[in-house]
Image (tube, rainbow, N blue to C red):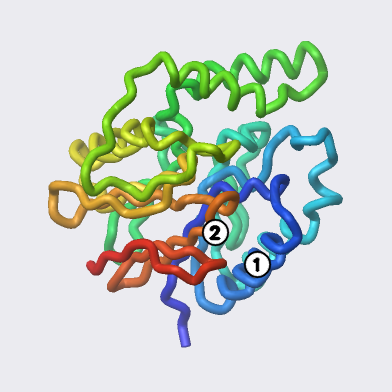
Amino acid sequence: MAKRKIILFSDLHIDRWDWERKDHFIEFLHYVEREASEVYILGDIFDFPALRGENIWPKHRDIINAIRSLSSNGVDVTYIIGNHDISLRGIEIEQKNLTMTYRDRHRPFVKTIFGQEVYMEHGHDYDPLFQSSIYDVIDFLKAVTGKAVDIMAQDVLGDLKRLFNQRPRKKDGGLPLKDESAEVGVPERFLKFWESAAEQILKRTRYNIVFFGHTHAPGIMRMESKGQYYVNTGDWFTHSTVVEMTPKALKVRDWITDTQLDKIRF
């Protein structure tokens, strides 16, 4: 029987996991292999450079191999690079059942899925700090010093810069919010940036769904125009969220707690 499910997730940050979360994720990948024909990972599998200066490959070899094995077993895997693994930018892979690419608002990933026109990117381009120029600076510093620029420094600068921006009010009916005390993700008062970005993209295009990661705020926002939605894939740091799409419906659920967070029918 042909598999008819599309799965999306993002923001794993596996450097920050304990063994229990790792085991849950391996279990989840077994589910993906059984149920999904395609999987889209919207960035930030890990943090480059590693949080404690460790080599990522030996410590997380089993996770990386498990994700790669999906493509070997017939699941189409597309990985869209995020800001925490921005060091991968410039590496484009296009193989059978495996794609890795960097996309942003200037070159989004667009595809028709079950008749729905969907738009995907990690979403860091809408963060007040993460403008494209900062990555050029990081690349320059790495070239001059021969050392990686710690991504955590970007997080600190990001929080500082956000404080000097307008604090938008939460729109009624908006996305569920994450705990602001988490080390990564976006404080709830700034989620309006991504909601507005998705709204503008949908207003000026014929897309049906905009998918972002980055904020760690999973959920579905229904737009004013019928049949248009903004979906955030959430994370696997404070949540363990998964977006599942079939020809008839789209839902967001938390894998570890087995809780459905939101659902729409087409």
Contact, mark 1 vs mark 2 (Cβ under 8 Å): yes
Query: In the image, is 210 to the left or to the right of 257?
Result: left
Quadrant showing the C terminus: bottom left
Mark 2 element type: loop
Q: Give me the C-alpha separation between circle 1 and circle 2.
A: 9 Å
Where is residue 104, by image quadrant?
top left
Relative image position of residue 93 (x, y in whole percent): 62, 47
Query: In the image, is 60 to the left or to the right of 238?
Result: right
For label 1, the residue is 24
Mark 1 element type: helix
Relative image position of residue 172 (x, y in whole percent): 21, 44
Q: Name which of mark 1 and mark 2 comes first in the sequence.
A: 1
Tag 2: amino acid? Ser
Question: How many residues crowd mark 2 within 10 Å: few (<14), some (14–19), many (20+)?
Answer: many
Report whether residue 41 is seen: no
For label 2, the residue is 240
With respect to residue 203, does 247 lie above or below? below
Name the disc covering residue 140, or none.
none
32, 116: nearer the viewer: 32
Q: Residue furthest left?
A: 225
Relative image position of residue 177 (x, y in whole percent): 40, 46
Report whether residue 119 is seen: yes
Relative image position of residue 116 (x, y in whole percent): 28, 59
Tag 1: amino acid? His
For the point 65% across and 19% down, the residue is 138
For the point 60% across and 57% down, the residue is 98
